[in-house]
Image (tube, rainbow, N blue to C red):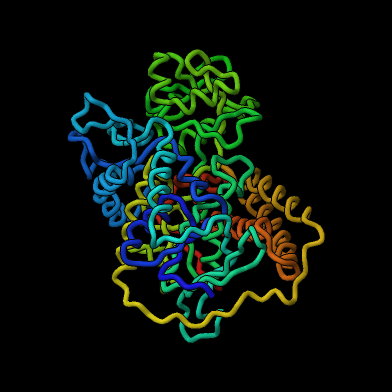
Amino acid sequence: MTQFDVIIIGSGLAGLTVALNLAGRKKVAVITKKALIDGSSDWAQGGIAAVLADDDSVEAHIRDTLSAGAGLCDEKVTRFVVEHGREEIEWLIKQGVPFTKDAASQLGYHLTREGGHSHRRVIHAADATGHAVQMTLCEQVRRHPNITLLENHIAVDLITGKKLGLADNHCHGAYVLDKGTGKVETYAARQTVLATGSAGKAYLYTTNPDVATGDGIAMGWRAGCRVANMEFIQFHPTCLYHPHAKSFLITEAVRGEGGILRLPDGTRFMPEHDPRAELATRDVVARAIDFEMKKRGLDCVYLDISHKPADFLKEHFPTIYARCLELGIDITRQPIPVVPAAHFSCGGIVTDLAARTDIPNLYAVGEVAFTGLHGANRLASNSLLECLVLGQAAANDILEQVESAIPPLPEWDESRVTDADEEIVISHNWDELRRFMWDYVGIVRTNKRLERAQHRIELLTEEIDDYYSNFRVSNDLIELRNLVLTAELIVRCAMQRHESRGLHFSRDYPDQLTEAKNTVLTPGGK
């Protein structure tokens, strides 16, 4: 086995924050299934919400977060994250992140406003904030002598005391497939951090990259961790609708800077759905678009910001301008065709304020975790903030732990399996899963739709488990196995919520209950 002090599975902002804050004192491995830069963090456009302006306040940011969360945000967690926002932004600036500057601002940086926010508090790097942050941190990680990078490696499963037959159920590392050699290696560590993001690829339409397959949620659940609030899948209202524009997001900041949602005939429709119009929270805007599309039989609606000066658009949204122009859409003169798409999961593995899970020595940070910050609906640009604050908290807690001995870990056993004979089974099951999740567990749900999804998941799980037991693991098989399990958890949580709240809207239970409760699932329980 190969041993490190800490292994971090995932290389988004949460994982890299943990790595860089540990590397001064620990030997760290960062395991990522594609290149270091690949992941949802790199795709984040809008920015990072933090209290930075003099006319803003911690209380206002907390209030906005609680309002968006529809009664389910943990106030203690929300305060903790918001209060640490400024110091994390200052840390990123020290790392060299090139945030967009504004000479007229007292702060020196431009702040934008997004849906659900009462103030301009979103610091950004034009419209490619995630890429600017990730490129900066990736450079630091690659140079650090205490960080070992394992790119093109995918974790298969966590190694716990329970699996080893030990009295305790501590996490001792993970089995990891080297995609280059096809061999599963054993990686041991005193602490293991899940920073794998979420599971947008469970849906047919998503703003997430291909790596978002629920790996960490599934591994954590199999290891014995509770999960919570998986029913709250945020559908971003505005994903570019074009046959050649796979997963391209149109940032919320376009609406924040005056973009108007229109029907094909040019009619504005958001004021009929909410007094905040285009600046309503994402759940409201996504449902409004979904309603208008289904009512009128539309393929898409249109986001129009062509009334703004062309130079302003090119300066503030250069990535969107360039991508749309490649597809024949000039956003300075034409509206942008958009549809909602699966974007973010507010639920995940249950953690505390130090990012600790139910399994000792196992941490979860970023979108894979359920901290209680987002409640029933995430406020725009709070996601990267959570990655930074909880990533720092996880690193601080790990540095305080007393070093313990790692038991000998067995090698991966593949003596009873063979090479797969038909890979078509995997691609067919993957396609089926994404389609029925979109149809039955999407923006608007019913009991019947959820029952249909659950039945199909049961059949797929049976097939995949049989496949997993008999054939050597591959990247696609690992991802499909994790995605089906994560989809099952989403459906189980949705079936337990007998109300409509935040991102979960049920036609059978259209009202909101008086008492707000989290949906918590426990392995082995019902």
Vertical position of residue 351 compared to residue 130: above or below: below
- Looking at the image, which residue is at 31% across and 46% down? 95
State the image coordinates of residue 447 (x, y, percent, origin top left).
61, 51
**Residue 246: x, y in percent?**
61, 35
Front one among 368 and 11: 11
Q: Which residue is drawn at 28% across and 42% down?
A: 93
Visible residue check, residue 353: no
Does residue 20 appear to the left or right of 213 in the view shown?
left
State the count of labels: 0
Question: Which image quarter is the N terminus in?
Answer: bottom right
Q: Please indicate whether residue 494 sits to the left or right of residue 366 in the image.
A: right
Outermost residue, right direction?
A: 421
Residue nearest the observer in this picture, 195 or 120: 195
Q: Is residue 447 left or right of residue 83?
A: right
- Residue at 57 percent of width and 59 percent of height: 153
Is residue 201 visible in this depiction of the protein?
A: yes
Judging depth in this view, the residue of 403 and 496 nearest the camera is: 403
The x, y position of residue 17, in whole percent, is 37, 54
**x, y percent for residue 157:** 57, 68
Quadrant where the C terminus sits is: bottom right
User: Compared with residue 175, is residue 498 higher up or lower down, i.e. above or below?
Assistant: above
Does residue 459 sit above or below 261 in this rendering?
below
